[in-house]
Amino acid sequence: MRVGQKSKDNFDRASLVFPDGTSRVTIERDPTPLYIDRGIGSYLFDVDGRRFVDLNCNFTTLIHGHAFAPVVEALTRQIQRGSCFANPTESEIELAELLCGRIPAIERVRFVNTGTEAVLFAIKAARAFTGRSKIAKLEGAYHGAYDWVEVSQAATPDNWGDPMEPKSTAFYRGMPASVLDEVVVLRFNDVEGLRRVMSLHAADLAAIIVDPMPSRGGLIAPKPEFIAAVQEAARANGILVISDEVLNLRQSFHGASARYGLVPDLVTMGKIIGGGLPIGAVGGREDVMKVFDGSAGRPLLPQGGTFSANPLSMTAGLAAMRHLDHVAFAHLETLGDFVRDGIGRAISIWDAPLCVTGAASLFRLHPRAQAPNDYRDIYPTAAGATLMKQLTRFFADNGIILPYGASAALSTPMTRADGQFIVDAFAGFLDRHQNLLDA
Ligand code: PMP
């Protein structure tokens, strides 16, 4: 990627104060990151003055793009009135009312500061409610940085084990063996596997945590029979279903579980509901959410947080979510179909060994011709990884930020012309990289 001099200079400075020059492992670098000066609408501008269409949107957070005027206005008003208090504000009630009104599975909600924290508290809530400690999760699915959900998040062909019996694999050296023992791993869309796991572990499970379309797992559509099997297994065995919609809440006005027919007991949220500010939330059934109820003394599950429900995140989230109406979702759905169809057409014209997955405002490209079924199918070969690196680089050099190994996100300010620009860039890549495609 052509990286400008100012970005390079910044990275040199940053390398003296951060262990790898950055503050998060997910920062893309090729070979150094692009440093951003500002974002406006669907565009990013780097410190060297170049403009990019932003398909990262801070890992799918900015559904209205950058510096969305209603969010800027709401934040400007709020910051002059104070940024955080030890008391509640009306803004938290309004955002909670919006979520309870929109997401069918949510009767009560609790705000935290990140998606990681939302997942962490949902799992603890399920444990407190059921009195059990184990959880089941999908291989390759990302749910943030809580140890138990990190299990098998980065499983590799060397350690993931038999396709019929996926192993619980450690995420980092020194991960406690007791954590691995507490997590049962499922494969996405594998109904048989789910039944087998249930026959062995059902009585010990507090929760099955699923992302209806796991992004890091490939952004692959769930089979209705898999969703139904998760639901049935949980109901039959007193296990709670946690739908992790930190990323996929953006799939419809009513969220992702509603779109795919899942009826979870708890839902975790983050990203879009904060309008670009840090946020997380866990919501769900009233009786389950009662574990957080401290009105009569110490609750089953005490939960706090210095910045939880801070009015900046609340007002930014409210402004963003209120503008995310049915018209906005219809626009994103149409644009998503347009981009995925255009990319799909280009793939068939060039007969390229690539495919596209996703739904609504999300899409992901894979270096394989056949549609993937689960995480194991998208594990890249060396040639596949090179192809994707070249694709990301080509996009950046042509003014588009395409996330590498993650989902691309469209935003409401994007137009049909932006969609065409993305499709044309993709076709341009195929045209110019015949050698890589044949490799
Ligand atoms: N769950 C899912 C499905 C996510 O995509 C993410 C973040 N990408 C998280 C949890 C963690 O959220 P955060 O980065 O806000 O901690």
Image (cartoon, helix red, strand yellow):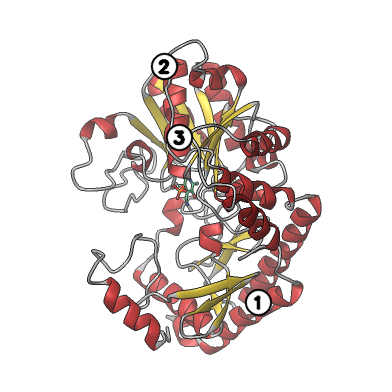
The residue where tag 3 is placed is: 193
The residue where tag 2 is placed is: 203
Pick the residue in front: 133 or 232: 133
Query: Measured along the vertical axis of the image, is residue 396 above or below residue 141?
Result: below
The answer to whether mark 1 and mark 3 are in CB contact below 8 A is: no
**Alpha-carbon neighbours of circle 3 within 10 Å: few (<14), some, or many (≥20)?**
some
Distance from label 1 to label 3 (Cα)? 38 Å
Distance from label 2 to label 1 (Cα)? 49 Å
**Which residue sits at x=39%, y=61%?**
26
Residue 375 in the image, given as x and y percentages of width and height: 45, 51
Residue 402 in the image, given as x and y percentages of width and height: 52, 71
**Which residue sits at x=47%, y=45%?**
114
Foreground disc of the pair 2, 1:
1
Q: Earlier in the sequence, mark 2 or mark 1?
A: 2
Foreground disc of the pair 1, 3:
1
Res. 423 mark: 1
Looking at the picture, which amino acid does disc 3 mark?
Gly
Looking at the picture, which amino acid does disc 1 mark?
Val
Q: Earlier in the sequence, mark 1 or mark 3?
A: 3
**Which residue sits at x=65%, y=56%?**
71
Distance from label 3 to label 2 (Cα)? 17 Å
